[in-house]
Amino acid sequence: MIDFQIDIENCINVLRAGGIILYPTDTVWGLGCDATNAEAVEKIIVLKKRPAEKSFVVLVASERDVLQYTAAPDPAIFDYLQSQEKPTTVIYDHAIGLAENVVAADGSVAIRITKDEFCRHLVKRLRKPLVSTSANFSGITPPAIYAQVDKEIVAGVDYVPRYRQDDTRQSPPSSIIRWKKGEVVKIR
């Protein structure tokens, strides 16, 4: 196992204090904060120069977390997700317990159960869902590797883990789907 415990500790301290982090995800480099803290979410909106009405992706560590932050999701979605190799974000109806500015106008929320070891540790230690939005200004190509992150974005966060900063492997963004009565509706 790669040792990223110091980075996890530092991230947790920042997140619990209402700060934002720049971190490697299972897809691209992302900006993150406690998804239950509206003030922290607002900091990301301002930093990204992003329209406030645009909703966010939230990372969780397990199916149980999805059940905690959504009302009555179809359990069959979890079987579908286990069959997917590519990271898959699901738009769930009826978000609960999240900051209002994380949730879409229709009350839905985009959630991904992360399989990435660093992100899973981070979410589990935080004990809350984590905002995961690409670390770029709104409308600009998301950074696949740390070297592609705009310096203004780096300067605008409270902490950047050293973990994976030198990694040059690139992963595509997640698939995004909506689950409608047992059917997959592909968004991306």
Image (cartoon, grey):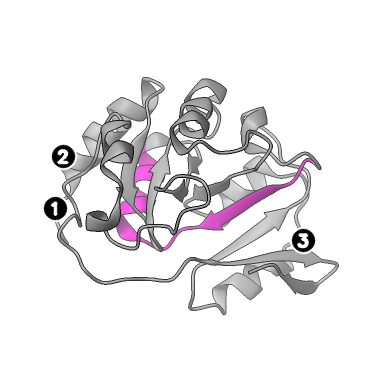
Going 32% across and 42% down the picture, which residue do you hit? Answer: 22
Along the viewing direction, whichever of 143 and 159 lies nearer the viewer = 143
Q: Quadrant of residue 95?
A: top right
Is 33 drawn above or below residue 91 in the view shown? above
Q: Which residue is mark 3?
A: 74
Q: CA distance from mark 1 to mark 2?
A: 8 Å
Along the viewing direction, whichever of 84 and 38 lies nearer the viewer = 38
Going 25% across and 41% down the picture, which residue do you hit? Answer: 8
Along the viewing direction, whichever of 149 and 178 lies nearer the viewer = 149
Q: Which residue is mark 2?
A: 6
Look at the image and tell me in which quarter the N terminus lies. bottom left
Q: Which residue is mark 1?
A: 3
What's the residue type where badge 3 is placed?
A: Asp
Q: Quadrant of residue 16?
A: top left
- Please check the rendered image and state whether residue 113 is part of the magenta-colored stretch, yes or no: yes
What's the residue type where badge 2 is placed?
A: Ile
Q: Residues within 10 Å of mark 3 (few under 14, many from 20)?
A: few
Going 32% across and 59% down the picture, which residue do you hit? Answer: 117
Rendered location of residue 105, percent (x, y): 77, 39
Residue segment shown in magenta = 107-125
Q: Check contact, mark 1 vs mark 2: CB within 8 A.
A: yes
